[in-house]
Image (tube, rainbow, N blue to C red):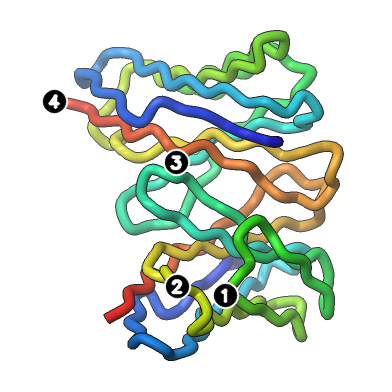
Amino acid sequence: DGGITQSPKYLFRKEGQNVTLSCEQNLNHDAMYWYRQDPGQGLRLIYYSQIVNDFQKGDIAEGYSVSREKKESFPLTVTSAQKNPTAFYLCASIRDTMNTEAFFGQGTRLTVV
Amino acid sequence: GEDVEQSLFLSVREGDSSVINCTYTDSSSTYLYWYKQEPGAGLQLLTYIFSNMDMKQDQRLTVLLNKKDKHLSLRIADTQTGDSAIYFCAESLGSSNTGKLIFGQGTTLQVKP
């Protein structure tokens, strides 16, 4: 079955550590996105990539980094520079930017301990 | 700038209709979406409407768009306990052509038996 897979489902990070969240899709979609969800604030865009080897900052990119070396994969690194990383992170993909439907992964809940 | 607003909470009785409202600011929106999120899960696309349409019906779901007032609503007929979830309104920006979505804060729908 085609879909978008995020791992791990739960992740714990110590202060000062970098952690990487995985997002893989087998839908052959061109565009991929990372959103952060905080209670009562909806989803905010961190980074997005419309094509392999290219990505753009979203609205809250500070303290995060991404790569897009393969079409199927768009990992997100939460660096120690991100001061408040505890949140629910959602990855999404779209076939192309003219397409209507975004497919979402099941999310990764990151907690700083 | 772009902004999407929703009320945060709605409570209805099973069998009643639910109406979730949303307002947006960007007049260049091409598509407007309704997503459903169950606890601890990703977002599932429920329905969408193109900006030149007034209404779209899909089984128990009716979407109404008032483009003049930039107001979008989702009506769920015969609401069931399984409809309890967070509902997000989102817009895609025709001017940007990036596939980015701007989300509202989400409306938590509570369905009482």
Cα separation, mark 4 vs mark 3, equals: 20 Å
Looking at the rendered image, the disc whose residue lies closer to the viewer, 4 or 3, is 3
Give yes or no for contact between labels 4 and 3 (Cβ–Cβ under 8 Å).
no
Residue A37 appearing in the image: yes
Residue A81 shown left or right of residue A58 in the figure: left
Q: Position of residue B63 (x, y in %)?
A: 56, 19
Tell me the residue that label 2 is attached to: A83
Using a 10 Å C-alpha cutoff, classify the residue at mark 2 as few (fewer than 14 neighbours), some (14 to 19) or many (20 or more): few
Residue type highlighted by circle 1: Gly
Residue A29 appearing in the image: no
Cα separation, mark 2 vs mark 1, equals: 8 Å
Q: Position of residue A109 (x, y in %)?
A: 37, 69
Residue type highlighted by circle 2: Lys
Between B93 and A22, the one lying in front of the other is B93
Looking at the rendered image, the disc whose residue lies closer to the viewer, 3 or 2, is 2
Q: Residue at x 47, y 86 (%)?
A: A19
Helix, strand or loop at label 4? It is loop
Q: Residue at x 53, y 83 (%)?
A: A79
Tell me the residue that label 1 is attached to: A63
Q: Are marks 2 and 1 on the same chain?
A: yes
Residue type highlighted by circle 4: Pro
Tell me the residue that label 3 is attached to: B36
Q: Residue at x 66, y 31 (%)?
A: B32
Q: Is residue B2 above or below residue A77?
A: above
Q: Is residue B65 above or below residue A85?
A: above
Q: Is residue B107 above or below residue B60?
A: below
Q: Are marks 4 and 2 on the same chain?
A: no
